[in-house]
Amino acid sequence: MGAPEMEVLDAAQAEPTAGIVLYNAIEAGLAELRDAGAEAFDVKTTAGNKAAREFVQRCVATRTATDEAYTNWNRPILAQQKLVREKRDEILAAVKAIETPVKDQVDAEQKRKDEERAAKAKAEAARISARQACLNAIACLPRDYLSAPSADVEAAIRDLESPEYLGQRDWEEYADQAKETAETALTTLRAHLENAKAREELAAMRAQQEAEAAARRAEEAKADAERKRVAGIKERIHAIEISPSTCIGLGVKQIQQRIDALAAEAADDFAEFQAEAGAAIEAALGNLNTMLEAARDAEELAQLRADKARREQEERDAAARKVREEQEAKAAAERAEREAEERRQADARAAEEKRQGDEAEARRREQVAAEKAAQRVREQAGTLLALLVEARAHVPAGDLADRIDATITAAKGE
């Protein structure tokens, strides 16, 4: 089905000439305005200021006329543009309505093809990934047997050599690569097998050597234990032999304890050396008993000497105690006499201090009484002086009058 031809309108040609004609008359007056504005206006004078204002009004009127001319010319053009835009929008909407169903079919078919290609690519990638994973598993198989026992490696080799190992799946274009990978893995596994056998043989040899070394160590330990046993018995016999020398200088109690301990020793405990042990015990006991008697005599002598020394010390202590007691009694008497003298002196000082205190208190009381009397005299002096002056006028001339005048003069300080 052929698509019908559609007529496309030519682009509208703008005709600015008509609009420009409107400005010819206005533009003709610009030269006049330019000449008039070139002259300087003396705006400080009334006439110059008026002329400048009128010029500005002419400019404003020119600009207003220019805007009005454009508006009057442009208004019908704007209306035409609106009609053309509306018609354009109607045509675009109609074309879109006709176009959309067909475009949706085209887009759906393209989407189906894209999804089909993506599914095929995904399936192919999964198939290749599965084959690569199987090849990688075969290539990595020897790593699992790097330190495995030889029996496990042999089993893995038999499994990989069997026709069923590669025949259990369709390798398609990877068949040759699978065979090569299997052969490489078999080569590596065979090397692992040789290593495993050598490792196991070495381990067996080491185990045998260790067993032989353990047997030697056991024999040596047994011999060492026997040597230590014999040395221990001989050391015990030697200790018995020298036991008397270790008791030199000890007291009766320590020597008796050693004799009792030695008597408890049984020759049968010394195994094949019981004869030597018996002789050593008998000789040591003889020496120790002799030392015991000597120790008893020495202790008895030491006790007698200690008793004598204690008695002599007690006598010296008693004499010294008597002398000390006499000295202490004399010192006590002297101390008592000093204390009595000190008390007498203290009593005398206290009595003197009391007497001085009483005298001071008496003097204080007398001073207070005198001060009070003087205060009373001062308080009455003015009255007495006035009375004396008043009485003088009634005393005839004579000795009494002279004495009254002298007293008045002294009281006034004249």
Image: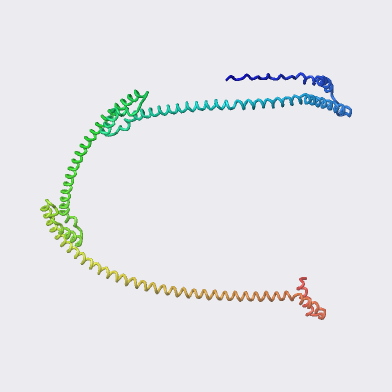
Rendered position, 196 above or below 262: above
Using residue 329 as the reference point, say whether residue 88 is left or right of it.
right
In terms of image quadrants, where is residue 245? bottom left
Please state, as top left, top right, bottom left or bottom right, where the N terminus lies in the image.
Answer: top right
Toward the viewer: 126 or 151? 126
Q: Which sits in the foreground, 1 or 243?
A: 1
Query: What residue is drawn where x is 47% and y is 27%?
Result: 118
Residue extending farthest to the front is: 1
User: Of residues 285 and 306, which is closer to you in this image?
Assistant: 285
On the image, the x and y values in percent for residue 278 come to: 11, 55
Q: Residue at x 58, y 19 (%)?
A: 2
Determine whether, in the image, residue 156 is placed left or right of residue 68.
Answer: left
Dividing the picture into quadrants, the one containing residue 330 is bottom left
What x and y, as percent, mark residue 41?
Answer: 85, 25
Quadrant of res 268: bottom left
Residue 7: horizontal and vertical position, in percent? 65, 19
Foreground of the two, 237 or 383: 237
